[in-house]
Amino acid sequence: MYESRRSGKVIRYIILFAVLISVGVYFFYKNGFTNSVEGIRDPIQESASGSVTIERGEYRFVVHFQYSYDIEALVVHTHDYGSGVDSLLSPKDLALAWGSVAAHNKDVNFNWDQSGRWYSWHVKSWDELDEVGGKMGVITQSANNHIIPAGERVKNDVMAIKKGDHIRLQGYLVNIEGYKNGTKCYYWNSSTTRGDSGDHSCEVFYVTEVEWL
């Protein structure tokens, strides 16, 4: 009887340990990890023209290319979206960093977060930001990106991106008009500068290529 009770207790510990390991692995791959990457260049943006039309149920979206966009970045946070008109186009937002922010991401506790199509960060002391050029350094070297995948292949790649990845994305910054039953009922315009903040400061990014670096 003693050996039986002891064996049962050992089995319960083994099961509990396995569950804890599984949960840890799940959250690691879901949320990634905090790291830093040095030497990431500024995004490259050039004037562009053209458009594509995307049909989603009752909606027809005309996506107008404003600028070609080529960004290498460290992914500091991600958020998936599955409801609302925006999610018909953009199932995922990526908070991206480059320059000194990416280089010091592990040293500075930025506390990155995303919700409601916004990204945010906060530090305990402004002194922490000296290495990245202060508050303006964070604003000009990080951005929230509403990702619109150009097709299923790109969508699969986009959905696989996680926090801590070092990636390169190529495509277009876009302005979007939406129509329902022939009536214009929606618009979504991209920021086209890295120096803005607050409302309308996110990049609406039609992505054509994803590369892990």
Image (cartoon, rainbow, N blue to C red):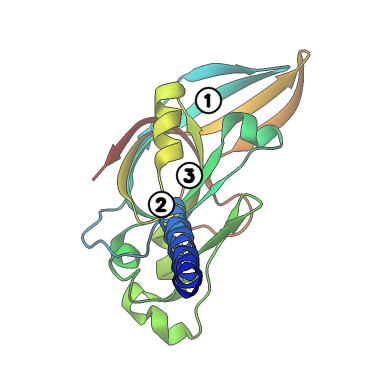
- In the picture as drawn, the residue positioned furthest to the top comes out as 182
Given contact means CB atoms under 8 Å apart, are the residues at marks 2 and 1 in contact? Answer: no
Q: Which amino acid lies under the numbered mark 1 shown in the image of this protein?
A: His
Q: Name the kind of residue labelled 2 in the image.
A: Tyr
User: x, y (%) of residue 202?
Assistant: 54, 49
Mark 1 → mark 3, Cα distance in angstroms: 13 Å
Q: Residue drawn 30% across and 67% down? A: 100
| Image disc number at residue 4 | none
| Nearest to the observer: residue 10 or residue 6 | 6
What amino acid type should be assigned to the residue bearing mark 3? Answer: Thr
134 with respect to 39 (left or right): right
Marking on residue 29: 2
Query: Are dots 3 and 2 in contact, CB under 8 Å?
Result: no
Q: Residue at x 76, y 13 (%)?
A: 182
Q: Quadrant of residue 18?
A: bottom left
Which residue position is annotated with label 3? 192
Task: State the residue position of label 1.
Answer: 64
> Sequence order check: which comes first, mark 2 or mark 1?
2
Q: Label 3: how many residues lie within 10 Å, few (<14), some (14-19) or many (20+)? A: some
- Tell me: 146 left or right of 61: left
Left or right: 55, with 133 as reference point? right
Q: Nearer the viewer, residue 163 or 192?
A: 163
Image check: 155 left or right of 40? right
Residue 86 rendering spot, x and y as whole percentages? 65, 35
Sequence-earlier tag: 3 or 2: 2
Q: Nearer the viewer, residue 151 or 179?
A: 151
The mark closer to the camera, 2 or 1, is 2
Q: Is residue 96 visible?
A: no
At a point 72% along the width and 20% down the height, the residue shown is 179
Q: Secondary structure at mark 2?
A: helix
Q: Is residue 150 above or below residue 134?
A: above
